[in-house]
Image (cartoon, grey):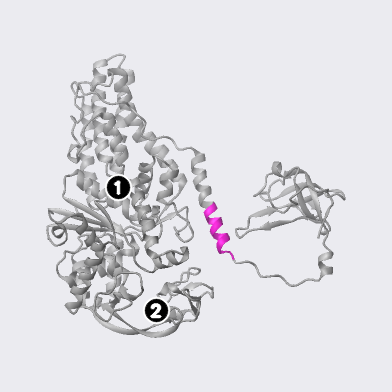
Amino acid sequence: METKKEYKRYLVTSALPYANGPVHIGHLAGVYVPSDIYVRYLRLRGRDVVWVCGSDEHGVPITIKARKEGVTPQDVVDKYNDIIKRSFEGLGISFDIYSRTTSPTHYQTASEFFRTLHEKGIFTEATSQQYYDEEAKTFLADRYITGTCPHCQSEGAYGDQCEKCGSTLNPTDLINPKSMISGSAPVMKETTHWYLPLDRYEGKLREWILEGHKEWKTNVYGQCKSWLDMGLQPRAVSRDLNWGIPVPVEGAEGKVLYVWFDAPIGYISATKDLTPEWEKYWKSEDTKMVHFIGKDNIVFHCIVFPTMLMAHGDYILPENVPANEFLNLEGDKISTSKNWAVWLNEYLEEMPGKQDVLRYVLCANAPETKDNDFTWKDYQARNNNELVAVLGNFVNRALVLTHKYYGGVVPEAGELTDYDKEILAELPKIKVALEENIETYRFREALKEAMNIARLGNKYLADTEPWKVVKTDPERVKTILNVALQIVANTAVAIEPFMPFSAEKITSMLAVDRLQWDMIGRTDIVPAGHTIGKAELLFEKIEDEVIERQVKKLADAKAANLAANAEVPEQKESVTFDDFGKMDIRVSTVVAAEKVAKTKKLLKLTVDTGIDTRTIVSGIAEYYTPEELVGRQILVLVNLLPRELKGITSQGMILMSADATGRLTLLAPTDKVPNGSQVG
């Protein structure tokens, strides 16, 4: 196992989510579900563990969000902190404390941390040129500067990145830069900042990581080695902003702590708010500290924050940083700005009672070693084929048969057969595998092992067939169902870290007290003579229409984003009135419609133009069915030269509009008018 020594206590942290929007499934799969599994496991084992998290409430994205919404930054963080906190609670994410970096404790802790490093002479000071908005009288953060991308020539690139082509930029790279605050062209102005000299700690970091933590996940170790091999550079710890924790030294007016310096100290301040004994979790070598993060935070938690802790001198360093890769959505990268995400707060509203389904799917498909993809079809399949058919089916059969044959009273087990012993002997083996995988942060494999107990139970019932044996050997059935109920209880313990709501439901149905980890492998958890509760379904089948609604919701979000960001086509060349007058557009009625054979897009329409009845072939089959069109009035360009399409002569063109997604919509008179009426 990864654990090198016995620890007296555990300190677990999870990356602080930015309080400028809700959390989505990418955040959950990368950070919060894995850390909840780990902490619940430690608690079941009776370990002394605290788990801290909280909202990251400073930084430029907060101020940009506030400016867009016309509110204060405090309004933004108050709104989203509440949404995030309630969403986590709804999914059963069981932090010991969910704090905030705008709390008084955090302001004090972060300020003291900075002052300590400042007084020890750790920081260096440097003066540089930075863009300044003379109208707004403020220095501009990278995200407050826009201009033309020097690579793809797109307008609206930010000072740190072009979202059109993905290029990483510096503000000085932009062509024709503009301030997002006033719209004016910024000027360069001198500013002084404090820097953390990462380069001075490169040797210590190399020894600590590259020599001392070769057991870290490959992606984490590899990224750290890459940073160290490139050579570390000093990193600024202050910014010219008016939102954040003021730099607590003289001569720092208008400067705040840079958010990456401020945020990880939030773990310390949260622990302070949680317990007066916070120091034993942060300053004792008997504590194992584990950071759960996404791969975009590896450098901060493995290089920058440890350097801060080393420089301070009073704190322990993390023992492990099990970062996950990214989760994609339906084949595309999750994007909050494009609303391409499954938001947790919306999921909880739209899929009530299915918290454990999401937890299960996100763990079973977790991006532990590479980027993975979430699809609603996979979500449905895992629910129906695994949770319903395996876990739910086994638990339900065992309890229902006990009620049917013994009125819900657990029967006494007789002499165990060799097969009974063989089945039960698997439980301790699964327990060992579970522990090995959880303690080395392989939660996908651990979940498979937990589900293997339910699979074992299903196999046992299928092989022993108590519903048949009861007719010939009722005494044998008592043993079978006693064994089955013990496996159900074992299942409840094993799945608790992964699916706590289901574990609690099984425990309630068994009418037993809260179970503990060391019970896995035991065959006397549910004693003979004990009366179990009513059997209820753990999971229900998810029908196609439920999934189709979610898929449509994503499609609508994509279409809305495309429409919102679409560039309006430039005006075409001017035409004369005589040019326009040559077009003969008539109100017409569709009298018949049918699909054109061997095509997906074409419809053959018969229309009454008021002049005649003619055939028109139109590529609108993706948007309208033949049944929808018959009887509708439309606009037709009747004097277009005939054209042959798929062997059909088309005599005219239907007038339609096209939005940014390319979707076509029929143009028609608002009131019914005679066929043949001219437009123009």
Q: Is residue 669 left or right of residue 397?
A: right
The amino acid at mark 2 is Phe
> Mark 1 Cα within 10 Å, few/some/many (few <14, many 20+)?
some
Residue labelled with disc 1:
445
Amino acid type for the residue under numbered disc 1: Glu
Q: Position of residue 522 (x, y in %)?
A: 18, 33
Q: Which mark is residue 374?
A: none
Check if residue 491 falls in the magenta segment: no
- Of callouts 2 and 1, the N-terminal one: 2
Q: Residue furthest right?
A: 611
Q: Is residue 15 left or right of residue 22?
A: left
Q: Which residues are magenta?
A: 556-566
Q: Which residue position is annotated with label 2?
A: 139
* One can see residue 646 in this view: no
The residue positioned 48% from the left and 68% from the top of the image is 163
Element type at mark 2: strand
Counting from the top left corner in percent of width and height, residue 68 is at 47, 65
Residue at image point 47% right, 61% down: 337
Query: Principal SS element in the magenta part?
Result: helix
Seen in the picture, residue 398 relative to 231 is either above or below; the reply is: above
In the picture, residue 390 is in which quadrant?
top left
